[in-house]
Amino acid sequence: MRYIRSLAHFIGRLVRIHRIFVAQEIKRMVEYKADFFIGMIGFLMVQCSNLLMLWIIFNSIPTLMGWSLPEVVFIYGFSLIPKGLDHLLYDNLWMVGSTIVSKGEFDKYLTRPINTLAHVLFEKLQVDAIGELVMGIALICSVLPQISVEWSFGKILLGLVSMFFSTYIFTGVKTLTASVSFWRKRSSNIITLGYKFANFTKYPATIYNEFIKNLITYIIPFAFTSYYPSVYILTGDNPLFNVGVTVLVSVLVMGSGVIVWHLGLRAYESAGS
Amino acid sequence: MKRRFRIYYPFVNAGMQQVTTYRVDWIFYLLGNVVHSLVSFFIWQAVFLSGSEETLNGFTMPQMIVYFFLIFISDTMITSDASMMIAEEVRDGSIAMRMLRPVGYNATFLFFELGGKLLTQIVLIVPVVIGVEISRFVLSGVVQFSVLNLLLFFVSTILAYLINLFFSICFGFLAFVIKHIWGTNIMKNCIVSFCSGAMVPLSFMPDALKTVFMLLPFASLNYTPVMIYMGVYQGADLLFYFGLQIFWALFFWALSKLLAMVSAKHLTVQGG
Amino acid sequence: MIEVANLRKEFKKTIKEPGLKGSLKSLFHPQSEQVVAVDNISFHVPKGEILGFIGPNGAGKSTVIKMLTGILTPTSGKCTINGQNPVVNRKNYVKEIGVVFGQRTQLWWDLPLRETYGVLKEIYEVDDKSYRERMAFLNETLDLDSFISRPVRTLSLGQRMRADIAASLLHSPKVLFLDEPTIGLDVVVKDNIRRAIEQINSQEQTTVILTTHDLADIEQLADRIVMIDKGKNVFDGSVRTLKSRYGQMRELNFVTESPHPAETLRYREQFHFAEDDVSVECEGTAVKVRFNSAVVPIADMLSYTLQTVQVSDISVKDADIEEIIRRLYMQGVE
């Protein structure tokens, strides 16, 4: 009972702190409106160039290994939503890997009476990500008339559940890779590597060979951020695996991220003399 | 020449030291680029497997492999941090110092980056070229490797790096007018990567677009070096595209000097 | 209040080799060595004391401070502050301390200063009433009101430092760690900050640990000095003890019309001074001679000087603490 109460206190406090940080970020944004707008357009353009590539590809072939253009676009659009959410809410982890640890700025977090990971995660809001989120929603909506899906309340709910949990697959991988900087001072390129694997999952996993497919399913499980949930939505097949394992994987990845982060704190060496 | 080299050698050395200091991070940087090119490779393999033809827009499957793995090399060769660095200097005002240094500041930066690239290329080029050539041999049954083309490719990527470096320096000066250079930098990288053929070979694009991208500096960055490696450009074509690369390198070099002068005036008007 | 016993911290440092060959070698076979940054440091600080923690660059001061504040985990040894171990229950522990790193800010850079205090109030769970009282007190001591509505990035260095000190005191910590709190500030601002620190210390019995390169900070504030060098404790005692133990240095000042007084006087040759025991500085006609009065008595120096050159306006005074410490840094302490 005592544990439950202190856990409730801990979570309540995190929620409070998160709200305060977000409020600060919104005040900051109001001051730098133009900057945030430019960032959003930038990310929107990155997505447009990828779409242009898909369009050019489908100009020379009718289907991609049996997947039609609308289906590929659906998977692509789905992948942008968890990715965009993670990008919007938890992008500060990039800074941990690139400068915060190597310049010793992490000291600040260690002198504050809040969980360091929560502090880092909540501190920044990356509005650029709205470009991705808007694009993701727009893509899904635009192909809805062209794909034959039997919609039901349960399916929509499970779709949303998997979007929520797959966000934490991104955050978990980013936490794991950012934690490396506690030992190696800098890990921005390791975080980038993690993200590059996510590129595989913008497309249907069946276009890859067995090795890659197993890699992105079992080792770096980004396939659960879009492909498997999309398969469930498009076909209605196997929700236990396509959605259930997504939830499981998300909890596992985020959990190990939290553990490794806290191991890393002990190895943190600060900077300077 | 020898004296100049002696001045700049410490910067080449510092560039290499930078790589070894963050050794693990650097290895992951390379791995990240490998994964990136693997994604391209698998998508284009799927495209070929889905189509019924042997060739797609003039490319065969083995050529596609060569194309995307050499883009990987040229892409790591041409990247430059110059725009973000200049933007940072504009923001904190230290850009004024740049005009006062006794050694060419742009040159020191260039040699610093070249130091890192030297190490990168030593580690990358041998395995990638061997891998690409073996797969090309297995798929086509003919040895098509040419040492001359490899050397020309290398010269061409160095020119491409210079174009991108001076272009990035020019771009960095935008920070005088735009505050959020980070977001604009993402746009820049996105345009460069698409228009230079790093995402889709230019020959897949509609003819009008292709012609425009070929003449603009974009193709010179990635497409031209790779075409040279593949032996597509010969004789007069080869000279023309080299000439075009040199032209763009000089163009952006001159533009960067001009912008530096303009911004120096701007600084004196503002009083530092 | 603070107990430090046999504290030790080791770092791993990679050895770099120059040149292409060296770079390739360290790429595939990185070499590293163990560096001892802090070696067996012990000291004790009672409640309400201001401790000056000094030492040359790279002596390990910051490393000790970072271990005391829970940022770094010691390799071995123990520090206990107010009965708590900094790394064991970090979140509880940091509520009782305030930390200011002079070279870094913990303020929210892009927002008005007021916002920072609002956020810190929540982070440290300060209730509304204590917050209001606290802000009134801090405003009185550090005069924040004149710039509290301005974005932090527009503050001057002195204002920023005052704001940072206020931020570290918002939750009424029992111990305050100040790492170079006066770095880069002009004389007037330095003085203001020293007075504020003094006031807080005397009003609230806050224990203060202060590292600095400006020894005027130490003279004005510190009750006691701990000096470390190359990671080892080399002195622990009051400013007075330091002066009486190592303070045989004297400063001889005079004005002379003679050309090249230093070449004419040649103290070192005359009295067989060792390298560190004498130094001569000339500025126009004014000459300043620092010498060790344990080697040559003051009277001998005076009479020799008066005999050798034409002198007007001669005086002798005790060397200041800066001079003592300069000598300690240079030769180490036996």
Image: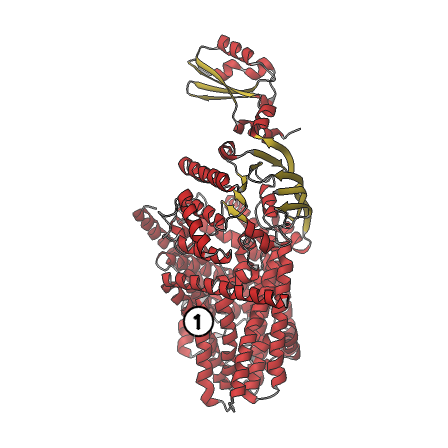
With respect to residue C217, does B36 lie above or below?
Answer: below
Residue under label 1? A130
Colour mode of the rendering: secondary structure
| Residue B147 visible in image | no
Quarter of the image with the C terminus of chain A is: top right
Front one among A96 and C200: C200
> How far from the left and from the top, in percent, is residue C319?
52, 23
> How far from the left and from the top, in percent, is residue C205?
52, 41
Chain ID at mark 1 = A
Q: Does residue B82 appear left or right of residue C57 in this picture?
A: left
**Residue at horizontal 39 percent and vertical 48 percent from the top:** C155
Residue at the left extreme of this rendering:
B269
**Residue at horizontal 64 percent and vertical 65 percent from the top:** B127
> How far from the left and from the top, in percent, is residue C228?
62, 36
Q: Does residue C110 appear left or right of residue B130 in this picture?
A: left
Amino acid carrying label 1: it is Ile
Front one among A207 and C210: C210
- Number of callouts: 1
Front one among A12 and C61: A12
Residue at the top extreme of this rendering:
C307
| Residue A12 visible in image | yes
> How far from the left and from the top, in percent, is residue C128?
44, 56
Dividing the picture into quadrants, the one containing residue B192 is: bottom left
Mark 1: few/some/many CA within 10 Å (<14, 14-19, 20+): many
Quarter of the image with the N terminus of chain A is: bottom right
Front one among C76 and C36: C76
Secondary element type, mark 1: helix
With respect to residue C312, does B53 lie above or below?
Answer: below
